[in-house]
Structure formats: structure tokens, C-alpha cells
Image (spheres, rainbow, N blue to C red):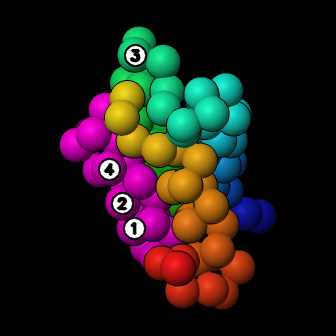
């Protein structure tokens, strides 16, 4: 029998992955300069924030922190955030690179 904590973790991970995927798909629709359309940045931020909270709940604090950082940047900059650059850095970090170059 599966323990309740394992069911919670699996559900949280599934939700987090789904919301992170939604944010990535929204970023793919950004302009050439990486800016989201004016009305879309809020939904993008919400997807990142949801994913961050769910990853934290599932025990993946490092990944949650990286996603939360992206969400904070969007909260600060709104539609001006260059989402293309943000995702490039995120992917480099998760591939083992320093992510800042």
C-alpha cells in the first residue's frame, strides 16, 4: 500500500511539472525581445509561483528556489522581464552550469 506522503509528493510533483510547462509554453510565445504581452505576464507569474510552492511541498527545495527566483523577477519587472534569457539561465543551472554567464 502506498503511504499518504508518497501520494502527496507524486501529486505535488505532477502539479508543479504541469504548471512549469504552462509557464514555459507561455514564454515560447513571447516577443523576439523576450517580453510577454501586457496581459499575459500575470498568468505566467502565477504558473511559476504555483510550481515553486508545489516543488517545495514535494521536498525539492533547490528547484523550488530556482522557480521562485524566476517568479520574483516577473513580479518585479512584469511584462519587461526577458523570459527567453530567464529560461536559458534556468536550463543551464539545471544542467549543472553556473547559469550566470
Residue drawn 56% across and 67% down?
89
Expressed as whole percent of the image width and height from the top left, the position of residue 101 reads 52, 79
Q: Where on the picture, by quarter, is residue 45?
A: top left
With respect to residue 18, does 13 lie above or below?
Answer: below
Expressed as whole percent of the image width and height from the top left, the position of residue 13 reads 63, 55
Judging depth in this view, the residue of 13 and 94 nearest the camera is 94
Q: Nearer the viewer, mark 2 or mark 1?
A: 2
Is 96 situated left or right of 49 in this image?
right
Question: Which residue does the numbered mark 4 point to in the structure image?
Answer: 73
Residue drawn 57% across and 65% down?
90
Question: Which residue does the numbered mark 1 point to in the structure image?
Answer: 65
Expressed as whole percent of the image width and height from the top left, the position of residue 44 reads 48, 31
Question: Which residue does the numbered mark 3 point to in the structure image?
Answer: 38
Q: Cβ–Cβ below 8 Å for labels 3 and 4?
A: no
Residues in magenta? 57-78
Using the numbered discs, state the Cα–Cα distance from disc 3 to disc 1 in whole angstroms: 26 Å
Secondary structure under the numbered disc 4 in the rendered image: helix
Judging depth in this view, the residue of 33 and 62 nearest the camera is 33
Q: Cβ–Cβ below 8 Å for labels 4 and 2?
A: yes
With respect to residue 19, does 31 lie above or below?
Answer: above
Amino acid at each position: 500500500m502506498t503511504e499518504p506522503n508518497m501520494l502527496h509528493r507524486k501529486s505535488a510533483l505532477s502539479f508543479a511539472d504541469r504548471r512549469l510547462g504552462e509557464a514555459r509554453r507561455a514564454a515560447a510565445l513571447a516577443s523576439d525581445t523576450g517580453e510577454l504581452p501586457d496581459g499575459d505576464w500575470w498568468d505566467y507569474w502565477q504558473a511559476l509561483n504555483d510550481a515553486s510552492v508545489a516543488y517545495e511541498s514535494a521536498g525539492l527545495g533547490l528547484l523550488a528556489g530556482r522557480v521562485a527566483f524566476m517568479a520574483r523577477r516577473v513580479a518585479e519587472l512584469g511584462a519587461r522581464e526577458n523570459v527567453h534569457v530567464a529560461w536559458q539561465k534556468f536550463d543551464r543551472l539545471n544542467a549543472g552550469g553556473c547559469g550566470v554567464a
